[in-house]
Amino acid sequence: MNLRQLELFSLVAELGNVTEAARHLYMTQPAVSQTIADLEENLGLKLFDRINRKMHVTFAGEVLYKYSKKILSLVEEAEAHMMEITNNRIGRLRLGASTTIGIYLLPMIVGQFKQQYHAIQSTFVIDNTTVVEEMLLDNRLDMGYVEGLVHSPEIVVQKVKDDELWLICSPRHQWSKEGRTIIEPEELEGQALILREQGSGTREVVEKVLQKHKVNYHPWHVLNNTEAIKRAVMEDIGIAFVSQLAVKEEVASGRLAKVDIKNIPISREFRLIWHKDKYHTPLLNCFIDLTMKLA
């Protein structure tokens, strides 16, 4: 039993005439008759009584007709929804973002996206790069937007923009009191450095650069929240490397101080990532285009 058989059966039941049904469907009368005969044989039931040259549904035919109308209606509804998805009128986006992007960048992008696509369901997870990568590999996300390095060959990476990491300290810190804006690399040694947790893109980039330049450092505190790190630095608990996105307002207002390390700029890339086998819906492609445009 297939949809074509149900469509033909329903029309014959409504018109009570095979010839009329054939005319409606631009088919030959024998082709319609054969389709009905095949359906009856498949079910092992007579669906019509042929009385006075008119087709009358049997009890089995009445039952099948009710189900046929429901099925055909659902198919029509499904096709309409598929068309709405094709035209980006409805859809779903499951997004993951590493902490900095998730707090300071993604809400703006999603907000603008929702202005264009009002009926879109969007959910996003904010965690470190490692977790976002794992969720993509498990198909729990459609796309990620991260600042850290990804390691699986199953993940496709597209660069969006560069981001600077600033070394910040409290206005009460000795460097601030001395009016220092540049320090020598060796001056980091002995400082109470606050780092993000393992798996954080920020921490991975910072450690990689410092090790490359053979800078000695001591991670005195580990915090998994950028805002908590900023508060700790304001209270002069330690110093930290944080995205300029997260602290530019505080630095501009004097609540935090920015210090450069001589000849060692630290930056990283913001990247869109997705599984290499993930089908890109038109909606997902629109999100990528908007993200690149707003970069």
Image (tube, rainbow, N blue to C red):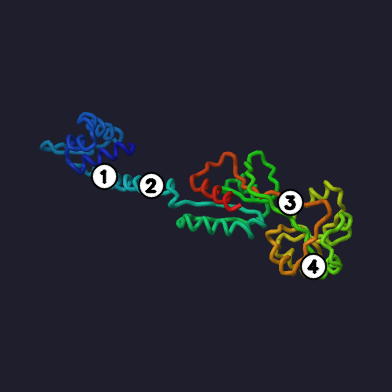
Q: Which residue is mark 2?
A: 78
Q: Name which of mark 3 and mark 1 comes first in the sequence.
A: 1
Q: Name which of mark 2 and mark 3 comes first in the sequence.
A: 2
Q: Whole-Å distance between the Cαs marked 4 and 1?
A: 77 Å
Q: Which residue is mark 1?
A: 65
Q: Name which of mark 2 and mark 4 comes first in the sequence.
A: 2
Q: Name which of mark 4 and mark 3 comes first in the sequence.
A: 4
Q: Residue at x 57, y 50 (%)?
A: 293
Q: Secondary structure at mark 3?
A: strand
Q: Residue at x 60, y 46 (%)?
A: 138
Q: Position of residue 16 (x, y in %)?
A: 17, 41
Q: Secondary structure at mark 1?
A: helix
> Count the marks: how many?
4
Q: Name which of mark 4 and mark 1 comes first in the sequence.
A: 1
Q: Amino acid at mark 3?
A: Ser
Q: Position of residue 252 (x, y in %)?
A: 71, 66
Q: Whole-Å distance between the Cαs marked 2 and 3?
A: 48 Å
Q: Whole-Å distance between the Cαs marked 3 and 1?
A: 67 Å
Displayed quadrant of residue 172: bottom right
Q: Amino acid at mark 1?
A: Tyr
Q: Whole-Å distance between the Cαs marked 4 and 3?
A: 21 Å
- The answer to whether the residue labelled 4 contacts the one labelled 1, judged by CB atoms less than 8 Å apart, is no
Q: Secondary structure at mark 2?
A: helix
Q: Nearer the viewer, mark 4 or mark 1?
A: 4
Q: Which mark is residue 170?
A: 4
Relative depth, front residue between 249 and 117: 249
Q: Whole-Å distance between the Cαs marked 1 and 2?
A: 20 Å
Relative depth, front residue between 277 and 270: 270
Q: Secondary structure at mark 4?
A: loop
Above or below: residue 287 compared with residue 9? below
